Structure formats: structure tokens, C-alpha cells
Amino acid sequence: MKSLRIFLKRNKISSSPNRFIVLPETMNLFFLMNVDFHININMYCTQKNDIVMKKERGGMASVIAALAANLLVAISKLIGYLLSGSAAMLNESIHSLVDCSNQILLLIGDKKARKLADNDHPFGQARAKYFYSLVVAMLLFFGGGALGIMEAAEKLFHPAHSLENTWLVIIILAVGMVIEGSSLWVAFREIKQLNTEQLSLFQFLRRSRHSEIIIIFAEDSCAVIGLLLAMIGTILTHFTGNSFYDAFSGVLIGVLLCLAAIFLAREFYSLLIGESATTTDMNTIRKAFVRPEITRLIDVKTVHLSATDILLTAKVDIADPFELQAATVINDIEREIRNSLPHYKIYIYIEVDEFKKNYQRA
């Protein structure tokens, strides 16, 4: 076993600046450099975290705006339903109320995610956003869709219900499409900014760690498609006099919400369990270990604690001539990783070890 590893284990060196350790005289300078660097890194991470938090707060402003818009749209749809008796309009009203609940839960999740680290949550509660997003997907999207299907199915099997004030319904639906279409356009623009790897839309939604953008995109897409289905059903019912089309469009809107719920639940389950950094980010991280001082990168693992927080652990084999400079080498690697990925707050833990051919990754 290498001399540095023996020294580290015997003396139980910690990188914490608050821990005092009596070291051999030849290693005092090594320790002081390590403590000073970590103090500077902590200050750097604090400053960068403030920038990240400001970005996240700016993103939540769009959620608040969407909440106000959806509330107005929901009221207008409910009025349209009461005046017309349209099953599709009822489903659209439920859909808009679901959207309002979505934004409220996302705001609650955002507030929870801002809580600082404590003894029970050493990395904070950033994953609270993923939990509340999962609640949105299952209880609201799926629950709202199932309720809409039941209401529409009842009218489908009892087609005697009448549709009144058709043109008022069409006007309300048209206004709703304009509002929701504008919101969807904003979502597309945000996706374009976040999609630095130029992935297809479906691939981006599958790989994105931003739960808010996934929810908002699914919500706006379902809203536009649902409004279009409701309008088609209303127009067909108006010109044919057959209320079947109105009820059937209501069923389709409910099915749409349920399918969206299944997709979202699958994505948020994966995020909640813990996904690694993206392939591009992993390549950037690995490049930081490519240097003469490192004989081999034995293992490296990452997990997203949130869209902007990453936990990184690595095990490296340092070349014999650089064993006594291990702290400096590791600090350089940490600095390069953080500089290469400035939009993340990264918790980095690197262990020095000796590579063995029969080594198995845990």
C-alpha cells in the first residue's frame, strides 16, 4: 500500500477547516494549504449558490404568472360550462383547475427546496421539487383526467344532454387557445435555452433534470391539444345536432391528461430516486482527471440532488512522484470541475486509492 494512503489512514486527515489535527512536521505546509483552499472553495460555492438561487427564483416568476392566467381561464371555462352544459367545456374547466393546483404545489415545492442543510438533510431539501412534481402528476393530472372521463362517459352513454350558447363556448375556447398557446411558446423558448446538447424534444424531456420545465411543457401542451379537441367536438355538435361529439371530445381530453400523468410519473420517479449527470457533463468531469499526476481514474459517480446541485464522488490512483502533493492535485481537479460547470453547485469527494486489477465498482 502506498505511503500516502498509510499516512492518511493513520492520521485520519479531514478536509474540514474546523478540525484541528496534529501532523508530522513535514506535512504542516501540506495541511495548511489544504485548509486554506477549502475555505476559499466554501466562499466560492456560497457566492455561486446565490447566483443559482437567483436564477431559480426568476424561473418561479413564470409559475406565478401561469397561476394567475390559468385561474382566469378556469373561471371563464366554468362560466361557459354553466351557460352551455358542454361536457368538453366541463373537462376543460377541470383541466384548468388542475393547472392552477399544479402551480400552487410547484410553489410549495420550491419553498421547501430552499431550506438549508441540517443534521437530518446534510445536502438540503432540493429534491422536494421532484416530490411535489410527482404529486402533481399522479393526484392532479391522473385524478383530473379520470374525473373528466367519468363525467364525459356519463353523457356519452346518455346523449340526451343539450349544448347551448355554442358560439359563446367557441369564443371562450378560442381565447383560451391564444393564452395557452402563448404560454407554450414561452415553454418552447425556455427548452431551447436549456437544450445545449441539441437533443430532440422527446429526448430532452426524458433527460432533463428540471422538473418545472417538464411540468409546464406537459401542462401547456395538454391545454392546447385539449382546447382543440373541445372546439372540434363543440363545432361538430353544433352543425350535426348530435351531442355524441361533445361527450366524446370530453373523453379524449380525460385520456390525454391520464397519459400525461403516466409519462410525468415515470420521469419524476427516476429523478426522485436519483439520476446521474448528463453524458456531456460526465465527459467534462472526466477530462478534469486527465493529467500526469493521475495514473488512473478508478471510479467516478454522480447524482443530481436537484437540477442545479450535483454530488460527485471519485476514486483515483495518484502517481508515485506526486503522492505528497495529493491535496494540491485534488484541489486542482475540484477547481477545474467547478470552473467547467459554473451553472452547478457541486459537492465533490475524491478518495486516493491504489488500483487493483480485480477492483469491482460498487
Image (spheres, helix red, strand yellow):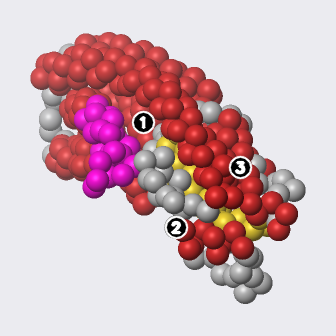
Residue 86 at x, y percent in the picture = 21, 29
Task: Say whether residue 247 is magenta.
Answer: no
Location of residue 362 by image quarter? bottom right
Mark 3 Cα-neighbour bin, 10 Å: few <14, some 14–19, many ≥20: some
From the viewer's perspective, is residue 25 above or below residue 328?
Answer: below
Marks 2 and 3: CB-CB under 8 Å?
no
Numbered label attached to residue 313: none
Q: CA distance from mark 2 to mark 3?
A: 18 Å
Mark 2 Cα-neighbour bin, 10 Å: few <14, some 14–19, many ≥20: few
Task: Say whether residue 121 is magenta.
Answer: yes
Residue 311 at x, y percent in the picture = 52, 52
Marks 2 and 1: CB-CB under 8 Å?
no
Name the side, left or right, on which 284 lies relative to 186: right
Question: Considering the numbered disc 2 on the image, is that residue within a helix, a strand or a loop?
Answer: loop
Name the side, left or right, on which 200 lies relative to 172: right
From the viewer's perspective, is residue 160 above or below residue 54?
Answer: below
Q: What is the three-letter code of the residue carrying label 2?
A: Lys
Name the side, left or right, on which 244 lies relative to 206: left
To which residue does mark 1 refer? 212
Location of residue 72 by image quarter? top left
At x 15%, y 38%, the residue is: 160
Question: Considering the numbered disc 1 on the image, is that residue within a helix, a strand or a loop?
Answer: helix
To which residue does mark 2 refer? 12
The answer to whether residue 297 shows anywhere in this view is: no
Q: CA distance from mark 2 to mark 1?
A: 42 Å
Magenta-drawn segment: 107-134
Mark 1 Cα-neighbour bin, 10 Å: few <14, some 14–19, many ≥20: some
Residue 276 at x, y percent in the picture = 57, 56
